[in-house]
Amino acid sequence: MFVLPSYSEGFGMVLLEAMANNCVPVVFDNSAVFNDIISEECGFIVPDLDADAFINACDLLISNEDLLLKMGQNAKQTVSRFSMSDVYNQWCKLFNELEVV
């Protein structure tokens, strides 16, 4: 499990690194980036500053090892699209599409 109880967070590499290592993220809903990466199958996005919801999500993962393991696998699969080779290929595609002026 990876908990990020930040009040404001941009696109942190630490989130991707944790998910790539099968950690289930629990974060506050304070960044649109989280909504693009974390789904109900691989983590928890709790209402901003709702400490009870944050604690409940953590308690659920602590008390249910099967859920923790399954969501951890899903987290790793979710962030595989950010692998170095995939990002490299996306950059190459973009540069190849640009017109030389």
Image: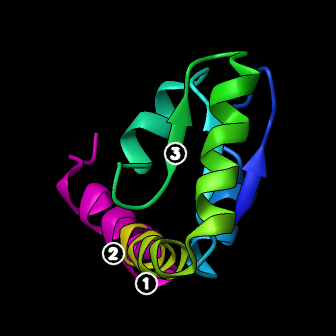
Q: Which residue is mark 3?
A: 44
Residue bounds of the magenta highlight: 79-101
Give the number of the mark in front: 1 or 3.
3
Give the number of the mark in front: 3 or 2.
3
Q: Are marks 1 and 2 in contact (CB under 8 Å)?
A: yes
Q: How far apart, in angstroms, are the residues tagged by discs 1 and 3?
A: 28 Å
Question: What quarter of the picture does the N terminus occupy?
Answer: bottom right
Question: What quarter of the picture does the C terminus occupy?
Answer: top left
Give the amino acid at mark 1. Ser
Crowd class of label 3 (few under 14; some 14 to 19; many from 20; radius 10 Å): many
State the residue at coordinates (80%, 35%): 5
Give the amino acid at mark 2. Asn
Crowd class of label 1 (few under 14; some 14 to 19; many from 20; radius 10 Å): few
Q: Residue 85 got which mark?
A: 1
Q: How far apart, in angstroms, are the residues tagged by discs 3 and 2?
A: 30 Å
Q: Which residue is mark 2?
A: 89
Tell me, yes or no, if residue 88 can be seen here.
no
